Amino acid sequence: MVSRIIPVETFDLVIFGGTGDLARRKILPSLFRRLSAGQMPDDARIIGAARGDLDRKAYQALIADALAEFVPEDKRPSELVERFLDCLDYVSIDATGDKGWGELQDKMRDVTRAFYLSVGPSLFGTISQKLASTGLATSECRIVVEKPLGHDLASAKELNAQLSACFDERQIYRIDHYLGKETVQNLMALRFANALFEPVWNAQHVDHVQITVSESIGVEGRGGYYDRSGAMRDMVQNHIMQLLCLTAMEPPSKFEPNAVRDEKLKVIRALQPVLPHDTVRGQYRAGNGEASYLEHAENPDSDTESFVAIKAEVANWRWAGTPFYLRTGKRLRARLSEIVVQFKDVPHSIFEEEKHHNNNSLVIRLQPNEGITLRMTIKEPGPGGMRLVDVPLDMTFADALGPDAAEAPDAYERLIMDVVRGNQTLFMRGDEVEAAWAWTDAILANWAAAKKKPQPYDAGGSGPEDALALMHRDGRRWRDIEA
Ligand code: NAD
């Protein structure tokens, strides 16, 4: 299959924090891949703006090293790397002072402008104001921000207020990289471009939905940061919430930014408050030669959860009575993100000896091996009577669509190109973020009031016992965490 790449128009992209980890590991390698693919024009300009006292040459050398580290050798021929480095420029800037702002103004051209704030959220307000007061921000420019978008509802509101004091909502691009994943968009294609699923996509036919984001690594190296947030703030409020929204939302009238985001917002607003016994918090123990959460966090008294499981309810006509089980954790058996839509059993089984066959399920896998699998029950081949087996109808993209699909752009590549194109569909709107915090805050408040320690769980397993019980008591079970 030949992929259709439409080049974007030229742009000036300023990356505040252009020397930081996120810029080196994700943003710049993603832009490099878009140049390689022929989507980013050669005259586009990427201006790193950070505290370091570098000149253009030193910045190019820093980014050459980043490409060598984060892009496989066979994907970075030297001619392409040179072309990419030619697009780079650098300004040594102090976000909180005056240094560098005049120089940045001198470098900007009259083309599409985007400002990527790859810095801590405490700088969002200051940088926004500087962009506005220096005239660097035009009425058509775009501003890109990353998680964490607040720590709770109050701080999220404050961040939104700081951004909207200087920019219109149509200029603000809040990145949740889960939304840039190929499979996540495929979930929308699957639901809204096929007549097959819509009639059964509701409480009448869906027994439950489970969403798992499991990681095999712990919080080593970033324990200090993580200990102030925990799994609920780091994963559930943003990434898992977005997956839940796309699974549960009504069909938007158009595939258009505000139509899609309106429908997602309605889902968040329909979420019922979660009762304390419908949540489980966990913290990993030492094991498999690795330290415990408490050691990684360097906080022996920490109450922060590295695992959470929640039974959520979307109280509307489509979903009343169909629970959404959510779980995420560190140091689990495997790295895996998936959404499972588990359909109800047939109303009456005609196969007498085969009462306990599996139900149909649709598994949407985000990582690893992005793809969609529909599990069906069929007759086991052979003459041995009517025996039923559960088999997958596999839609692994690489198999179905050829090697091009296996090399689909990573989430950041797509999202940054969407910023340049001015398409906000895959970005969170301010009211969505606030509604998600309102729901999350209530759960966090219940936990704080209960003053209970998170349950310890073994490294390399599937989380605390209570998380298994959360589904068992409803007569259901989690899918195994398997890579
Ligand atoms: P980092 O500490 O590696 O880099 C910070 C960058 O900001 C540096 O380039 C530094 O020079 C610049 N900076 C800091 N203070 C400045 C100032 N006063 N004026 C000008 N420049 C200043 O941080 P990071 O890991 O790249 O993360 C950046 C932001 O992105 C953080 O808010 C982080 O939470 C978020 N984020 C990071 C990741 C990741 O994978 N690293 C993922 C998601 C979100």
Image (cartoon, rainbow, N blue to C red):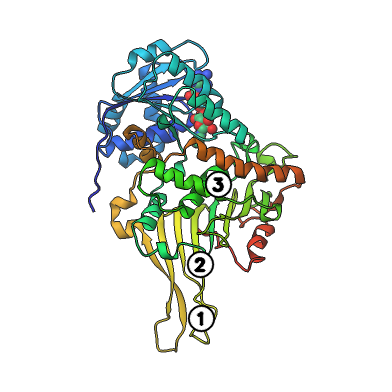
Indicate the position of residue 20 as horizontal and vertical percent values.
48, 27
Q: 465 or 290: which is nearer to us?
A: 465
Kindly check if marks 1 and 3 are in contact, taking CB atoms under 8 A apart as contact. no
Q: CA distance from mark 1 to mark 3?
A: 36 Å
Residue at point 49%, 34% (across, down): 146
Residue at the far front: name it: 317
Decide which of tag 3 and tag 2 comes sooner along the chain. Answer: 2
Going by the image, does 288 lie left or right of 33? right
Q: Quadrant of residue 207?
A: bottom right
Q: CA distance from mark 1 to mark 2?
A: 15 Å
Q: Which mark is residue 204?
A: 2
Going by the image, does 366 lie left or right of 467? left
Residue at point 31%, 42% (across, down): 74
- Say what amino acid the circle numbered 1 marks: His
Residue at point 41%, 37% (across, down): 70
Going by the image, does 440 lie left or right of 168? right
Indicate the position of residue 99 as horizontal and vertical percent values.
46, 11
Residue at numbered disc 3:
269
Which mark lies nearer to you, 1 or 3?
Answer: 3
Dot 3 alpha-carbon crowd within 10 angstroms: few under 14, some 14 to 19, many 20 or more: some
- Say what amino acid the circle numbered 3 marks: Arg
Element type at mark 2: loop
Q: 255 or 94: which is nearer to us?
A: 255
Q: Is residue 480 above or below residue 147?
A: below
Q: 171 or 327: which is nearer to us?
A: 171
Decide which of tag 1 and tag 2 comes sooner along the chain. Answer: 2
Element type at mark 3: helix
Q: CA distance from mark 3 to mark 2?
A: 21 Å
Q: 115 or 218: which is nearer to us?
A: 115
Indicate the position of residue 295 as horizontal and vertical percent values.
69, 40
Residue at point 59%, 53% (across, down): 332
Indicate the position of residue 131 as horizontal and vertical percent values.
43, 18
